[in-house]
Image (cartoon, rainbow, N blue to C red):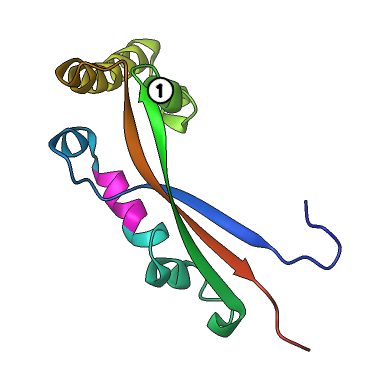
């Protein structure tokens, strides 16, 4: 919803660059793609090439999400993969995603891990005319 006189804003949330060994263990190729295309000013400028760059304002906000063992499977369940595969394939994919984070959590002695994210925010303020 846009308040009167307000301007559109967009937010992309991406997993931050892995630093810790456990972060590297659960990282995947889509994270790297998202960081490059949605996590940087250059990436967002390319995505929004149809808008004049002088009218865009960028801001990055670091945040953490305590990811439990069930979160990866719950996320996968929201993707088109969950619809396009057989129930058996879905079950195997969900179990693999749970197992990856379970190994990390068990090794760290935790029920959840603080996965670092970056919110890449863009506000567009159209120029006059």
Q: Please name the predominant secondary structure of the magenta segment in the image.
A: helix
In the image, residue 110 lies in the stretch drawn in magenta? no
Tell me the residue at 57%/84% (across/down). 54
Depth check: give the residue in front, 109 or 122.
Answer: 109
Would residue 96 be found to the left or right of residue 72 on screen?
left
Q: From this view, report whether residue 16 is shown above or below residue 22.
A: below
Q: From this view, report whether residue 6 is shown above or below residue 69.
A: below
Q: Is residue 84 visible?
A: no
Q: Is residue 36 visible?
A: yes
Element class at badge 1: helix
Q: Quadrant of the rendered structure where residue 55 is?
A: bottom right
Q: From this view, report whether residue 105 is shown above or below residue 16.
A: above
Q: Which residues are magenta?
A: 29-35
Q: Which residue is mark 1?
A: 71
The crowd level at tag 1 (other Cα within 10 Å; few <14, some 14-19, many 20+) is some
Depth check: give the residue in front, 50 or 1.
Answer: 1
């Amino acid at each position: 919803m846009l308040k009167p006189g307000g301007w559109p804003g967009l937010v992309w949330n991406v997993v931050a660059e892995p630093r810790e060994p456990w972060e590297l263990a659960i990282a995947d190729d889509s994270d790297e793609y998202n960081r490059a295309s949605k996590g940087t000013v250059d990436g967002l400028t390319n995505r929004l090439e149809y808008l004049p760059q002088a009218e865009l304002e960028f801001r990055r906000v670091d945040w953490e999400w305590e990811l439990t063992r069930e979160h990866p499977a719950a996320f996968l369940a929201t993707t088109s993969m969950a619809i396009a595969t057989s129930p058996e394939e879905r079950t195997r994919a969900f179990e693999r995603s749970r197992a990856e984070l379970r190994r990390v959590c068990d090794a760290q002695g935790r029920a959840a891990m603080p996965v670092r994210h970056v919110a890449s925010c863009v506000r567009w303020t159209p120029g006059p005319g």
